[in-house]
Amino acid sequence: RVSRPGALSRRAAASAHAPSRDLPTLGGVAGERSFARASRAPLAAWTTSTASASSDWPLGFGARPGSSRDKSTRAGALNGGGAAFNDKPKSLEVAEDAGVGSDADRARPNVFVRMALSLGGFYSTESTNQRAADRLYAAITAQCDGEAFARTFEIERSFRGEHSALVLHVWLVLRRLREEGESGKALAQTLYDTFQDDVEHRVHAEGVRVRVNKWLNELEQGFYGSALAYDNALTGGQGDLAKVLHRNVFHGTDDASNERAKRLERYVRRELGCLAATDGKAVREGRVRFSGVE
């Protein structure tokens, strides 16, 4: 684990001399959030956590009243259209010339600039991982915060619904990074930290000012519980994953959510296949984009 000053230095070094063609990171909130909470548990806790597979949500995180996005359903979204998610998985790699290029692909600065960047830590493993994690998380938020995803799966437009979608997609990427050995392990930790930093920002954006650390700790434990439940469901019997999605994403609200959960299961299994088909170098560099859902 890195200290708070160390985390600040890592991000400063990672952002130095960043080209404008990078994807925007963290939906534009990176500059507003705090960095690396000292009390955060390492990602390794995923494999040892005793957290429940379902989450108890704190008060105040319900649907947003008065918002046009607070309805949990969209007319015709499930029955009227959208992809069937039965197509053959394909790579999610984004080409290096599509605005998400790797650090090695960028135009090399002159020798004096390179020396300054090197002294500042721009080329260090930590800084390189931070930039890759920012790209990966930008892809995650682009999928989860988009209207298309919420409309297709009828995700509740509230903190609870949006956080559940983020947890699901962070789990998808972390599971893929397990296959990348030690380099994947380090990047997975950085991605997880980036996710938790954004969660902290989102909690504050909801207007929560009291007992913030308590809610953050509960949300973190909820992530571990959900991740373990998803892992176990993949090795369980037929329909187990849909049941877990019904509980963790749709919160077991009604019979109709069972059908939504089955549809989301097909999407999740397809994206797992797509990530498996994606070249490891592209994943480690953050050059991925999730499949369309409409």
Image: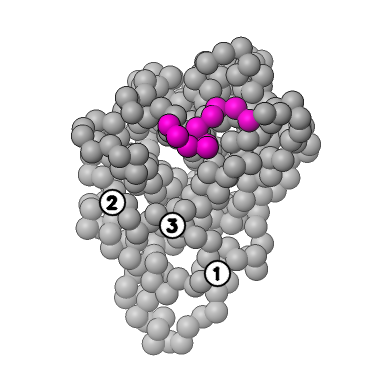
Rendered-image quadrant of the C terminus? top right
The span from disc 1 to disc 2 (Cα, nearest Å) is 25 Å
Q: Is residue 257 above or below residue 16?
A: above
Q: Which residue in the structure is indicated by mark 1? A: 21
Q: Is residue 240 above or below residue 107?
A: above
Residue 43: x, y in percent? 37, 38
Disc 3 is placed on an element classified as: helix
Q: Residue at x 78, y 36 (%)?
A: 87
| Residue range corresponding to the magenta coloring | 65-74
Residue 271: x, y in percent? 65, 38
Identify the disc placed on residue 34: 2
Amino acid bearing label 1: Arg
Q: Is residue 71 magenta?
A: yes
Amino acid bearing label 2: Ser
Residue 214: x, y in percent? 24, 30
Q: Nearer the viewer, residue 82 or 42?
A: 82
Q: Is residue 222 above or below residue 288?
A: above
The span from disc 3 to disc 2 (Cα, nearest Å) is 14 Å
The span from disc 1 to disc 3 (Cα, nearest Å) is 15 Å
Disc 2 is placed on an element classified as: loop
Q: State which tag comes first along the sequence, 3 or 2.
A: 3
Q: Residue furthest top?
A: 255
Q: Which residue in the structure is indicated by mark 3? A: 28
Q: Is residue 266 above or below residue 287?
A: above
**The quadrant where residue 80 appears:** top right
Residue 94: x, y in percent? 65, 57
Q: State which tag comes first along the sequence, 1 or 2.
A: 1
Prevailing secondary structure class for the magenta stretch in the rendered image: loop
